[in-house]
Image: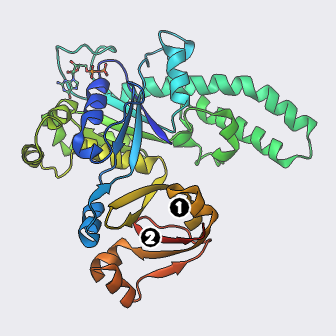
Amino acid sequence: SLSIGIVGLPNVGKSTLFNALTKNDALAANYPFATIEPNIGVVGVPDPRLDTLAEIFGSARTVPATVTFVDIAGIVRGASEGEGLGNKFLANIRETDAICQVIRVFEDPDVTHVEGGIDAARDIETINTELILADLQTLEKALPRLAKEAKTNAKDKDKQEVLAAAEAARKVLDGGRTLFAGAADAGIDVALLRELNLLTVKPFLYVFNVDLEEFSDEALRAKLSELVAPAEAIFLDAKIEAELTELDDAEAAELLESMGQTESGLAQLARVGFATLGLQTYLTAGPKEARAWTIRKGATAPEAAGVIHTDFQRGFIKAEVVSFDDLVEAGSMQAARAAGKVRMEGKDYVMADGDVVEFRFNV
Ligand code: GDP
């Protein structure tokens, strides 16, 4: 499954955040945090639609989609030169599908800042520079080979395109931009770069670890959001997120309300992280469970069926589909059918987020 690597300089609150993520019962709901390895956490993606479905269908339980976070230690200035844990860091991050940078904004004289003082823009640049340098190394190694392949296969359009994309990518990186931020502007089709497994092509998202005063500072939020756009920015206080996981639901809701929030930072992180991975959900419901299933954006109905069981994909006949909103408005599946809101979709149907589905298949 797809995963998000959590990276950040030392002492920015990564461990605090990761531990809170993996301890969050509310998030984990019916998906108890699975300890695969100490640095991998699987957390549920909060989805209030599941509770609504459970009411309509009398489901005994709800099962959310999940998102996998990997705590990746070891980024420091010079990581791309193999300093410290640099090489291991780069290898670990290469295996993830998105990069979540934790950036320290909170001030605390008792917690040393490795770069001397609080400066979000500088820290983002420090991390991006290491990733950019690592990608440049990869490209420098690959370009002679790609050039040779393009030359010896002069009529192979693919080889020419890959070479051109790699050269354009080098220019973007030389200019100090990540490919996530700069590839589209440079007209690069990143699919052509896939075989190179570059780091900065991966989608980025940012967690700004703020303290409570900064949390409600709208001007600061706007400034930091702009700094990382088009990546998503999440603002949270890692220490408070850790506290929230220790509280019961009522106490947690009260603390969140005092901060003007209806949702924890961790819940936001799970939701935004899921979307950053290019994933979406469709829903199924019955007396046993109301459940969110994970698919790629753009997945067809048979592919969606295959997530439940490969037999469902092989024997796919059709999908009975109603949008979540139409179902809720009708009040029941029967009423939705009577109102003509339930569609029969074939094998070419592209799933929409929030489709409530029943598959028909041969076994
Ligand atoms: P890591 O090195 O990035 O994993 O950082 P840690 O999670 O170990 O945090 C380093 C120190 O900063 C610890 O003493 C944390 O308690 C503290 N810390 C983490 N988040 C916050 C925060 O939001 N506010 C404050 N004041 N301290 C924090």
Query: Which amino acid is tagged 1?
Result: Ala
Residue 213 drawn above or below residue 118: below
Q: Quadrant of the C terminus?
A: bottom right
Residue 214 drawn above or below residue 229: above
Identified at 62% across, 71% down, the residue is 348
* Crowd tier of the residue under label 2, counting other residues whose Cα lies within 10 Å: few below 14, some 14–19, many 20 or above: many
Counting from the top left corner in percent of width and height, residue 352 is at: 47, 67
Q: Assess mark 1: CB under 8 A from ligand 1?
A: no
Mark carried by residue 304:
1
Query: Which amino acid is tagged 2?
Result: Val
Counting from the top left corner in percent of width and height, residue 248 is at: 10, 42
Label 2: element kind: strand
- Whichever of labels 2 and 1 marks the residue nearer the N terminus, that label is 1
* Crowd tier of the residue under label 1, counting other residues whose Cα lies within 10 Å: few below 14, some 14–19, many 20 or above: many
Identified at 32% across, 26% down, the residue is 14
Q: Residue furthest top?
A: 84
Residue 8 drawn above or below residue 212: above
* Pointer 2 with pointer 1, Cβ within 8 A: yes
- How many labels were placed on the picture? 2
What is the CA distance from the residue labelled 2 to the residue labelled 1? 10 Å
Residue 221 visible, this angle: no
Counting from the top left corner in percent of width and height, residue 147 is at: 83, 32
Q: Is residue 138 left or right of residue 278?
A: right
Q: Is residue 68 left or right of residue 258?
A: right
- Location of mark 2 (residue): 357
